Image (cartoon, grey):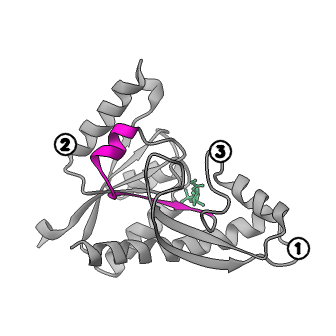
Amino acid sequence: MSDNKKRLAVFCSGTGSNFRALFDAIIERELPAEIVMCLSNRSQCGAMEFAREYDIEALHLSESQFGALDDFARAMLNALRERRIDMILLAGYLRKIPDEVIAAYPEKIVNIHPSLLPEFGGHGMYGMRVHEAVIASGETRSGATVHFVNEEYDKGRIIMQHHVPVVTGDTAETLAERVLRCEHRLYPAALEKLLAEHP
Ligand code: GAR
C-alpha cells in the first residue's frame, strides 16, 4: 500500500504554514503521498521545527556550506536521489533551485506564489514585497498560484489559482493574511489534483 505513495520533499525557508497545511491535508484526505523530508536553507526556522516535531527528516542545505554552486547543486540532487523523491513542493522556499535539479525533475517541482501569476511575479518578488506591489497598483483582487517550476522565476505552467478580493483599507499585512489563508486551501487542492492526474 505505502509503495504507491508519492515520496515528497518540501522545501521551505520560513514559517512553514503551507508545509503544515500540506502535511495535514495528506493525513486528513488520505492522499497517496508521504512527506519524506523538509529541506531548508535555514537550520532553524518554523518549518524545520515542525519537521523535527513530526519526525520528518529536516535537512539543512545551503549554498554557504559549499565552495561552488555546482557542488551545492550536486549535493541537492544526491539528497533527492538517495531518498527516491518523486515530487518537490516549494513552500516559501526563497532560494533559486539550481538548473541541474530543475532539469532532473521536469514538471516534478511545484511552487506556490502569493499572487495571481503572471502578475506580480519574477525575480525579487516574494513574500511581503508581492503584497506591497499589489496594494500600490490599486488592483481590486489578488490571490495565489500553484505552478510548475522551470528555469525562469514564476514562469512555469500554472496548475491552479484561487482569487481573493483586495478591500478598501487593506495594507500589505492584511492582504498577506487573506492570501495566506487562501494558500492553505489552494496548495492541498493542487496537490490532490496532481496526485490524481499522475497516480
Ligand atoms: C507564502 O506566502 C508563499 O506563497 C511565499 O512565502 C510565504 C511562505 O509562508 N512564497 C513566495 O513568495 C515565493 N515566491 P509559509 O512559510 O508560512 O508557508
Residue positioned most to the right? 169
Relative height, residue 147 to residue 56 (above, below): below
Ligand number 1: quarter of image: bottom right
The residue at which mark 2 appears reads as 82
Q: Is there a contact, CB below 8 Å, between mark 1 and mark 2?
A: no
Q: Indicate which label's residue lies in the foreground, 2 or 3.
A: 3
Is residue 193 shown above or below 23?
Answer: below
Question: Residue 37 location, x and y as percent?
Answer: 32, 51
Determine the secondary structure under disc 2: helix
Amino acid type indicated by mark 3: Gly
Q: Nearer the viewer, residue 44 or 14?
A: 14
Q: Which residue corresponds to the image point at 78% horizontal and 76% vertical from the top-left?
A: 140
The Cα–Cα distance between marks 2 and 3, rounded to whole angstroms, is 32 Å
Q: Is residue 156 left or right of residue 163?
A: left
On whether residue 108 falls in the magenta region, the answer is yes
Residue placed most toward the observer, 37 or 152 = 152
- Answer with mark 2 or mark 3, whichever residue precedes in sequence: 2
Query: Which quadrant holds residue 183?
Result: bottom right
Residue at 78% in and 62% down: 172
Residue beneath label 1, please?
169
Residue 146 vs residue 107: left or right?
right
The residue stretch that appears in magenta: 99-114
- The vertical placement of 71 against 180, above or below, is above
How many angstroms separate mark 1 from mark 3 (CA)?
26 Å
Residue annotated with mark 3: 124
| Figure check: 140 above or below 12 | below
**Reading the chain from its start, which is encountered first: label 1 or label 2?**
2
Dot 2 crowding, Cα within 10 Å, few <14, some 14–19, many 20+: few
- Find residue 76 and report its horizontal and vertical position in percent: 33, 37
